[in-house]
Image (cartoon, helix red, strand yellow):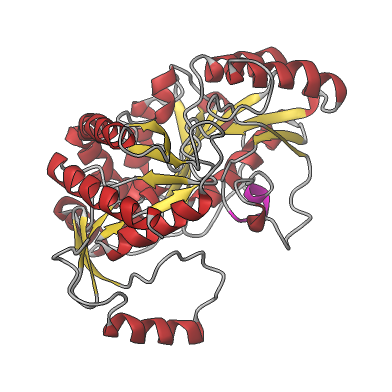
Amino acid sequence: MKNPHIKTELPGPKARLMLARDSAVVSPSYPRDYPFVMSHGRGTEVWDVDGNRFLDFVAGIAVCSTGHAHPQVVAAITEAANKFLHISSDYWHETQIRLAEKMNELSPMGEPAMSFFAQSGTESVEGALKLARYVTGRPRFIGFLGGFHGRTMGSLSFTSSKYTQQKGFFPTMPGVTHVPYPNNYRPLLAGADQGEAVLSYIENVLFTSNVPPSEVAAILIEPIQGEGGYLVPPDGFLAGLRALCDRHGILLIFDEVQSGIGRTGKMFASEHFGVKPDIMTLAKGLGSGLPIGMVVAKKSIMSKWARGAHGNTYGGNPVCCASALATIALVEGGFMQNAATVGAHFQARLRELATRHAVVGEIRGKGLMIGMELITDQASRKPAAELCDRLVTRAYHNGLMLLSCGKSTVRFMPPLVVTIAEIDEAVEILEASLVEALAG
């Protein structure tokens, strides 16, 4: 497919020069997929340094929730920056207080909430883990296979979407036991309902043979699993997990770093399941691109933290808080509903595409958090990992930015401002790229 917006062979000459400069001075550890060098962006569109235009269905890994350079977000950032750029968390400022008040108003726990401010998803998870240990006095945790919670040592001990993320860093934080994330399309345990099977495994196997439930501080889970494959849990699973936690005095932590702030068509993905956590972690789309994270917890829990028990230097940065407030206002003001409406159209178009290509195994997701799993054949459902990689690369060359997740799932996470016309353009590019990828 020849995309009229691609003017040069990719990467273009300016991009190649920057890639050469980068390789001499920047860490090679970044898991980069293709050589895109950005110049600027507006909404769902981005341009590289050679003037090529792309549809961005990556959004900075679900970060640019309001699109690139939304004028209301830029205005909020500018206004805040003109006042002051930083004040440490030893002091107070009005924008930070307003953001905490707004989070309490959104009521993710269904009761009064308090917030701790951070700069990233992994730091938010670290804060949630420390809080859980502090208030329960318990040392152990349970996480889920396929989960991604960050790369610092505490959160890394839960991260298990790819072994390469832990390779070379053992030992991480001790005391974390992993169980399967329920996936009816790829069951790991016996039983038609993998949600029930996983709950039974925790209660009747893990808690009787290996992990004393009285020592478990918290269970950490993504309400919709991100890096592990954009997996939506079976109906009733999160409610069952909530009940299990309540029986044993275990805190339930929802990692909504990727799924929160309107991404799924609701403010928080957990709202789709009617389940309230004790603690929630947020980041990514919260600041429309500025580095901000939050640990939000029931006031009855976070109020137990003593002065000095946890802190940081940059938490609650005034510019980042202003960006987050503007982001939430836009999400509430229509972008969240757009994610639900346009996301439903997107899934319908992808399912239509699947009828023409047997290598498309399953379409799943909520709102604009959608996964398309590729398989070698319908009978075995074997993951088509190489095809997935080729498709992502071909899409880039045709003007569509994508990333993969799981073993062979293409994930779609465009800005929440994406239009139906842009979805239709993306599906056209996607199908043409799939045909090219199948041709090798």
Q: Can residue 418 be seen in this view?
A: no
Does 92 appear in magenta?
Answer: no
Q: Position of residue 425 (x, y in %)?
A: 17, 48
Instruction: Say above or below: 24 vs 412.
Output: below
Residue reaching furthest to the right: 209
Does 155 appear in magenta?
Answer: yes
The residue shown at (17%, 43%) is 424
Residue 134 position by quadrant: top right
Residue 108 position by quadrant: top left
Q: Where is residue 72 in the image (x, y as percent from the top left)?
A: 16, 51
The residue shown at (50%, 46%) is 408
Q: In this view, does 66 lie to the left or right of 23?
A: left
The residue shown at (67%, 53%) is 163
Q: Can residue 198 be seen in this view?
A: yes
- For the N terminus, the quadrant is bottom left
Helix, strand or loop for the magenta stretch, by majority: helix
Pick the residue in front: 110 or 141. 141
Instruction: Say above or below: 104 vs 290.
Output: above
Q: Where is residue 394 in the image (x, y as percent from the top left)?
A: 34, 61
Pick the residue in front: 359 or 347. 359
Badge count:
0
Pick the residue in front: 148 or 372. 372
Pick the residue in front: 351 or 418. 351
Residue 419 position by quadrant: top left
Q: Position of residue 355 (x, y in %)?
A: 31, 32
Instruction: Say above or below: 31 vs 221.
Output: below
- For the C terminus, the quadrant is bottom left
Give the residues drawn in magenta, as a range. 151-156
